[in-house]
Amino acid sequence: MLARFADHPASVGETYGQHLATAWGFAFALLGAGAACLLHGLLPFAFEHTASGTVRRLEARMSARAGVRLSP
């Protein structure tokens, strides 16, 4: 059972702790982007490019980690 905690992180060249930190970093960035979207809905002049910029940066980070480009 404990091996399951290390199998996937090892498959992407990380320890469990490194994978946890990376995944949480992505999660908090996405939570921030979601909050920016909510506020943008209320205040259209605010956060006009925040969420899209966050998604682009995260996609670039994830693609670089995987060695693959996920989108054109």
Image (cartoon, rainbow, N blue to C red):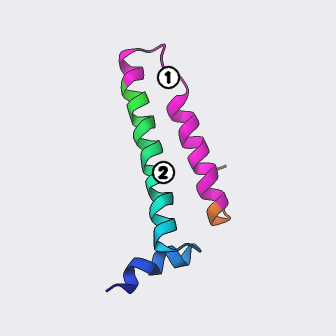
Residue at 59% across, 74% down: 13
Question: Compared to 33, does 38 lie above or below?
Answer: above
SS class, disc 2: helix
Q: Which mark is residue 61?
A: none
Q: Crowding near pointer 1: few (<14 within 10 Å), some, many (20+)?
A: some
How far apart, in angstroms, are the residues tagged by discs 2 and 1? 19 Å
Residue 70 in sight from this viewpoint: no
The residue segment tinted magenta is 39-64
Give the camera-side residue of 29 and 48. 29
Residue 60, position as x, y percentages in the image: 64, 50
Question: Compared to 19, does 33 lie above or below?
Answer: above
Residue 19 in sight from this viewpoint: yes
2 and 1 marks in contact (CB < 8 Å)? no
Q: Which mark is residue 26?
A: 2
Residue annotated with mark 1: 47
Residue at 63% across, 62% down: 65
Q: Amino acid at mark 2?
A: Phe
Give the camera-side residue of 48 and 17. 17
Residue 53, position as x, y percentages in the image: 58, 35
Q: How many marks?
A: 2
Precedes in sequence: disc 2 or disc 1: 2
Residue 47, position as x, y percentages in the image: 49, 22
SS class, disc 1: loop
Q: Does residue 49 appear to the left or right of 16 in the view shown?
A: right
Question: Compared to 72, does 66 lie above or below?
Answer: below
* Magenta span main SS: helix
